[in-house]
Image (cartoon, helix red, strand yellow):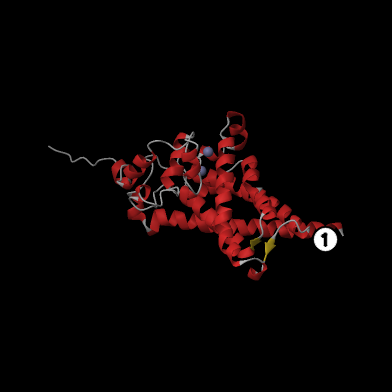
């Protein structure tokens, strides 16, 4: 009886671990290949720092991300138990809720997650919390897509508990929930990609309310500002956006930190 219970728990834990591992590997691989292979020429002209990440950085980011996936799987297991108790409101049939809710639920979850992330992130930068919660993530001064889940156990827990909390608060279709998780991890790996993906002029247009890779990369370089995840709203409302963010964006897409700009100049020997 006890053994069967433990085997069932282990099965659920492994399911959550493998699901999150698949999404992390997929998103980080797509972003890494985009930067280093698929769009190599374009991306090399849109680097965000002259400093380059080393293999040791990537190994550390990957190792801590594996630890975080263990934390996520544990919280996922708790979420499964809450669902068995009827406390989690995931549903399978679109007709169970009105059309407007099926359409509005994905934007709603992203907006709530954005606020949750901003305030948790700012709190973790408090000197009393930083060392215990957020220091590990900021070991990446030049982040790569593999830093997406490079967290200490405390930060991993804080990020993970959003799932059971929101699922207890809101009824969500299973596919909406999956779509949210995919948006989150792809956006997360993009923000850490080290090259600017957004088109020139992005920060001067109507979509400027969405963060760019420059936005989060600056956070890794300077720490005290640009705390937002999906949107720039909270940083602007709270006055925490770096004042030269748009200027750095323009300089990055103009190639100021590009491979060519940082390559040692060839000199021609003269007699
Ligand atoms: Zn980061
Ligand atoms: Zn931070």
Q: In the shown orientation, is residue 148 left or right of residue 88?
A: left
Image position, residue 190 (x, y; %) = 46, 51
The residue at 82%/58% (across/down) is 5
User: Does the image show residue 73?
Assistant: no
The residue at 78%/57% (across/down) is 85
Pick whichever, 211 or 253, lies toward us: 211
Image position, residue 265 (x, y; %) = 25, 40
- Mark 1, residues whose alpha carbon is within 10 Å: few (<14), some, or many (≥20)? few
Residue assigned mark 1 = 4
Q: Residue furthest top?
A: 127
The residue at 43%/39% (across/down) is 218
Classify mark 1 as within 8 Å of ligand 1 or not, answering yes or no.
Answer: no
User: Does the image show residue 221?
Assistant: yes
Q: Is residue 224 above or below residue 21?
A: above
Of the 4 image quadrants, the one containing the C terminus is top left
Dot 1 falls on a residue whose secondary structure is helix
The residue at 58%/29% (across/down) is 127
The mark tally for this picture is: 1
Q: Residue furthest right?
A: 1
Image position, residue 192 (x, y; %) = 47, 47
Q: In the shown orientation, is residue 168 left or right of residue 122?
A: right
Of the 4 image quadrants, the one containing the N terminus is bottom right
Pick whichever, 125 or 35, lies toward us: 125
Image position, residue 99 (x, y; %) = 59, 67
């Amino acid at each position: 009886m006890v053994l069967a219970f433990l085997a069932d728990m282990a099965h659920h834990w492994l399911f959550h671990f493998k699901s999150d591992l698949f999404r992390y590997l997929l998103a980080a691989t797509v972003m890494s290949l985009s930067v280093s292979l698929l769009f190599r020429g374009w991306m090399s002209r849109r680097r965000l720092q002259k400093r380059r990440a080393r293999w040791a950085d990537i190994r550390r980011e990957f190792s801590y991300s594996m630890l975080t996936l263990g934390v996520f799987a544990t919280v996922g297991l708790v979420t499964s138990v809450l669902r068995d108790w009827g406390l989690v409101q995931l549903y399978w049939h679109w007709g169970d809720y009105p059309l407007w809710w099926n359409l509005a639920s994905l934007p709603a979850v992203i907006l709530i997650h954005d606020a949750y992330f901003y305030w948790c992130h700012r709190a973790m930068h408090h000197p009393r919390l930083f060392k215990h919660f957020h220091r590990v993530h900021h070991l990446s001064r030049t982040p790569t897509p593999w830093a997406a889940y490079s967290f200490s156990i405390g930060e991993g827990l804080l990020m993970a508990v959003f799932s059971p909390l929101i699922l207890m608060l809101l009824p969500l279709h299973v596919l909406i929930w999956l779509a949210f998780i995919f948006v989150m991890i792809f956006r997360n790996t993009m923000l850490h990609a080290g090259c600017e993906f957004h088109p020139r002029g992005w920060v001067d247009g109507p979509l400027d309310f969405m963060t760019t890779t420059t936005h989060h990369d600056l956070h890794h370089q300077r720490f005290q500002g640009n705390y937002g995840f999906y949107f720039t709203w909270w940083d602007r409302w709270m006055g925490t956006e770096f004042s030269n963010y748009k200027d750095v964006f323009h300089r990055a897409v103009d190639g100021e930190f590009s491979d060519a700009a940082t390559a040692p100049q060839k000199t021609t020997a003269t007699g």
